[in-house]
Structures are given as structure tokens and as C-alpha cells.
Image: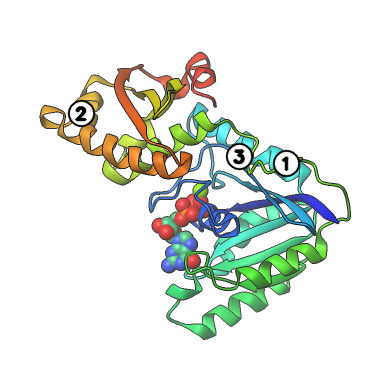
């Protein structure tokens, strides 16, 4: 049997979370068209009779500007150390040099597969071959695979190549758990995803979600969550005219949570103002960062 840790790195928006979800066949990591949606290291466990892969999705690599971003980069550092195989994801529509600048600084000890993603959206196939050759010439790179995480194409070949490098060993996790994170975490992430999809510009980056109550009743699961913002004006935007926006948020989040939990859900949302929470250690801790 083969078993080990496969950690996914790359610039914001390269498609790391989309790839994790494609491997798992389930929405484990939230995705949006905005950069820096992922804030934690998210582990997902894929177990078959022949192998166990613990995938880690990580926040995109950036220069931290506030404390929350510091914590996000610490999540990246932790994943650099325990990787058995590292996947470095590059957006196929961008020049290879941009991702290379980040990749070379990671100094990974694990074998590296460079994954060129979004090939479905690339207009110039010759450019793809140039990027492939460019990465193949780098000393940190074992091989290059072209994929579309969104269309789930090339991902089977990628999985085969991962297994080629994965060490022999016993499973790290027993049973059929697909993550080491609690259900509450996934619930708060699904709400956060909807905030990224519904609200514009900076607001999602000023927002955290904390599940305060999670109760399994006979016919449904009751969930109460706080949406944390930094300013009173942001609270007004989250609520919308006459509560219109938060209602829409609640409905779309509830649908996804019901699909994830496979149960009816009663979802209650509250908005709280916590000035400067992104730079305040006790708040960051309370909100799970
Ligand atoms: N066209 C295309 N878009 C993709 C692909 N993979 C991801 N995306 C999109 O790129 C954006 C960022 O994806 P996400 O997985 O959140 O990137 P992350 O920041 O690296 O985790 C989202 O809008 C995805 O739908 C792909 O293979 N093709
Ligand atoms: Mg992500």
C-alpha cells in the first residue's frame, strides 16, 4: 500500500482548491473567482484499497500585509515541511516565469510535479508547450503535467504520477473520514464562500464566520452562525435593504450545507462588528486562524 501527504501550492487563483475538489469528487475547499479565498490549510483524505493520499490545499502565496495574512502564510510553511509529494500549480494563461519566481523560493525537499492548470481556457497551445519546457528545465521540477481542474481533464494522469512518487506505508487515518477538520469548520467555510460570491470588492476580505451553535435535532440540524465584520457600515451592506441580502446569503448557504450534511438544515445568521479583528490576536484565535 502507498500512503502519504500531497501538498498543493501556487499563486492565488491558480486553481488549487478546484483541483483538491476534483480529486475528492466533493466540495471540500471553497472556490471563488476572487484571490485569497482559502485561509487555512485544508486536509482531505482520499482512501482506496491501494493507497491513502492526504491532500493539503493551502492559501495562495503572497507577501503578508496584515496579521490574518501572516497566519495564512504560516499555514503554507507547515505544508512545505511534511510533503511527500508537492504539486506546484501554475495558471496556464500566465507566463511561466511568474509562478517560477515563487516556486524556486519554496526549497521543497519532496519531489515536485509542476501542474499547468486551466488548459481549457488557453488560446495558444504553442505557449503551453513553451511553459512546459521552461518548467522541465528547472532543477526543482521532476515533471510537468497539463490539466484542467475545472473540467476534470488530465487529473487521472496526474493521480498516477503522484502515486509513482508516493512512499509505501500504512494509512495515517483509519475509517472513512475524508477530513481531519470538524463539520463546523466546513459549515463556516460554505457560508464564507457565499459571502465571496455575493458581496463585492473588499468586503469578503474583512469578514469571518464563526459557527456558534450546531445541534442535531430529530428532523433537522440547527445551526447558528455569526458573521464578523470590521465596521458598522459593512454590517449594513451584509444585511442589505430590509435584510434582503442576508436573506439571499442564508438561502444559498443553507442549500450547500444541506447537500454537504445530507440533512435538512435550519440556519440562523447574525452580523457582529469587531473593529480590527484581522489584526487582533484574540479574535484571530477565536475565529480559528
Ligand atoms: N477555466 C478554468 N478555470 C479554472 C480552472 N481551475 C480553477 N479555475 C477557476 O479559477 C478561479 C480560482 O480557483 P480556486 O480553486 O479558488 O483557486 P485557488 O486560489 O488557487 O484555490 C475560480 O474561478 C475557478 O473556477 C480550470 O481548470 N479552468
Ligand atoms: Mg483556494
Q: Name the residue under label 3.
A: 41
Crowd around label 2: few <14 · some 14–19 · many ≥20 (10 Å):
some
The quadrant of the rendering that contains the C terminus is top right
Q: What element carries label 1?
A: loop
The residue that appears at 63% across and 36% down in the rendered structure is 75
Residue 175 circle label: 1
Query: How many residues crowd around disc 1 within 10 Å: few (fewer than 14), some, or many (20 or more)?
Result: few
Could you say which quadrant of the image residue 78 lies in? top right
In 3D space, how far apart are the residues under numbered discs 1 and 2 (Cα atoms)? 42 Å
Residue furthest out toward the bottom:
126
Q: Kindly state the secondary structure of the residue where label 3 is placed.
A: loop
Direction from residue 235 to residue 104 in the image, left or right: right
Colour option used: rainbow
Residue 200 visible to an observer of this rendering: no
Q: Looking at the image, is mark 1 or mark 2 earlier in the sequence?
A: 1
Tag 3 near tag 2, CB within 8 Å: no
Q: How far apart are marks 3 and 2 (CA)?
A: 30 Å
Residue shown at 49% from the left, 69% from the top? 118
* Marked residue nearer the N-terminal end (3 or 1): 3
- Of 281 and 153, which appears nearest the observer? 153
Q: In this view, does 172 lie to the left or right of 104?
A: right
If the image is split into quadrants, where does the N terminus sit? bottom right
Front position among marks 3 and 1: 1
CA gap between label 3 and label 1 equals 22 Å
Residue on which disc 2 sits: 239
Q: Where residue 279 appears, x then y in whole percent?
A: 46, 22
* Marked residue nearer the N-terminal end (3 or 2): 3
- Judge by depth and name the residue closer to the eye, 6 or 223: 223
Which residue does the image show at 57% across and 47% down from the upper left? 61
Amino acid at each position: 500500500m502507498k500512503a502519504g501527504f500531497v501538498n498543493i501550492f501556487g499563486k492565488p487563483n491558480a486553481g488549487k482548491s478546484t483541483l483538491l475538489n476534483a480529486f475528492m469528487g466533493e466540495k471540500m475547499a471553497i472556490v471563488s473567482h476572487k484571490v485569497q479565498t482559502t485561509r487555512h490549510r485544508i486536509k482531505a483524505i482520499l482512501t482506496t484499497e491501494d493507497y491513502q493520499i492526504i491532500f493539503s490545499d493551502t492559501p495562495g502565496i503572497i507577501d503578508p500585509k496584515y496579521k490574518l495574512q501572516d497566519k495564512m502564510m504560516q499555514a503554507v510553511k507547515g505544508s512545505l515541511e511534511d510533503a511527500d509529494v508537492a504539486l506546484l500549480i501554475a495558471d496556464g494563461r500566465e507566463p511561466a516565469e511568474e509562478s517560477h519566481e515563487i516556486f524556486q523560493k519554496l526549497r521543497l525537499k519532496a519531489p515536485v510535479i509542476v501542474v499547468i492548470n486551466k488548459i481549457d481556457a488557453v488560446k495558444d497551445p504553442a505557449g503551453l508547450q513553451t511553459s512546459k519546457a521552461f518548467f522541465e528545465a528547472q532543477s526543482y521540477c521532476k515533471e510537468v503535467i497539463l490539466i484542467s481542474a475545472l473540467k476534470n481533464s488530465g487529473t487521472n494522469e496526474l493521480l498516477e504520477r503522484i502515486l509513482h512518487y508516493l512512499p509505501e506505508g500504512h494509512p495515517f487515518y483509519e475509517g472513512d473520514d475524508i477530513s481531519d477538520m470538524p463539520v463546523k469548520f466546513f459549515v463556516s467555510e460554505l457560508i464564507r464562500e457565499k459571502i465571496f460570491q455575493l458581496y463585492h470588492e473588499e468586503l469578503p476580505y474583512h469578514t469571518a464566520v464563526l459557527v456558534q451553535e450546531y445541534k442535531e435535532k430529530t428532523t433537522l440540524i440547527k445551526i447558528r452562525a455569526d458573521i464578523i465584520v470590521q465596521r458598522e457600515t459593512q454590517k449594513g451592506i451584509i444585511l442589505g435593504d430590509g435584510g434582503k441580502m442576508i436573506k439571499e446569503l442564508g438561502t444559498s448557504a443553507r442549500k450547500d450545507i444541506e447537500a454537504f450534511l445530507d440533512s435538512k438544515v435550519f440556519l440562523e445568521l447574525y452580523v457582529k462588528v469587531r473593529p480590527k479583528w484581522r489584526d487582533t490576536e484574540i479574535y484571530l484565535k477565536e475565529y480559528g486562524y
